Image (spheres, helix red, strand yellow):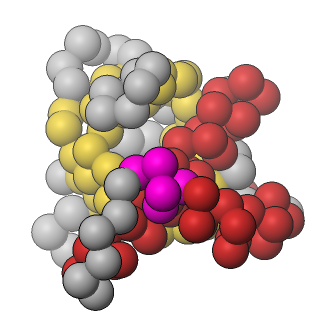
Amino acid sequence: MNERRQFIRHPVNVAIHISPQSNDVLEDISMSDIGKGGISFYTNVIFEQGSALSIKIPHVQPPFEALCVVCWQRDKGESFEVGVHFIDEDSRFRARMIEQVCHIEDYRRKAIEEGRSLSSEDAASEWIAKFATDFGRA
């Protein structure tokens, strides 16, 4: 099966840090998608397929950190879209929780844009009531 098609991806806009295993240079970039088994992101750095990377998402509590492997990379002109998959099952599970938090925050942001005052807790309650069943199946 094509690695790109194995996991359902969900759009997300979260800042992440990428650290190639070959050096300690971090690159702050925006994650574009997150799914059950990995993420994709845009960067101006070329990563070889099979390269090991460390992914850090510092803006969630507790901060998320996981090892992953580059599955694919596409040239997008001025940048590259890179897809990676997490190496261990625990990282996949934790990424799934982060994905849910991102959906809830997006739901909250849209409610605020519509003129509703909504706390993070209230947004979580509403989102879970409306979408958690479908999210669990994705």
Residue 24 in the image: above or below residue 138 = above
- Magenta span of residues: 120-124
Query: Which is more toward the observer, 103 or 81?
Result: 103
The picture places residue 96, in percent across and down from the top left corner, at 65, 45
Most distant residue in the bottom direction = 114
Q: Position of residue 6 (x, y in %)?
A: 77, 61
In the image, taking residue 123 as reference, residue 78 lies left or right, namely left
Task: Evaluate whether residue 73 shows in this view.
Answer: no
Residue that appears at 73% across and 24% down? 90
- In percent of the image, x 81 and y 66: which residue is there? 133
Q: Is residue 93 left or right of residue 117?
A: right
Q: Quadrant of the C terminus?
A: bottom right
Q: Position of residue 45 (x, y in %)?
A: 23, 45
- How many marks can you see? 0
Magenta residue check for 114? no
Name the image quarter holding residue 114. bottom left
Going by the picture, which residue comes out furthest to the left? 78
State the predominant SS element of the stretch in magenta: helix
Report the quarter where the N terminus lies.
Answer: bottom right
Residue located at (54% from left, 55% from top)? 124
Locate residue 131: give its quadrant.
Answer: bottom right
Tell me if residue 64 can be seen.
yes
Q: Residue at x 44, y 70 (%)?
A: 107
Examine the rendered structure and indicate whether residue 109 appears above or below residue 7: below
In front of the other: 26 or 138: 138
Q: Judge by depth and name the residue closer to the eye, 112 or 64.
A: 112
- Residue 52 lies, in percent from the top left, at 50, 26
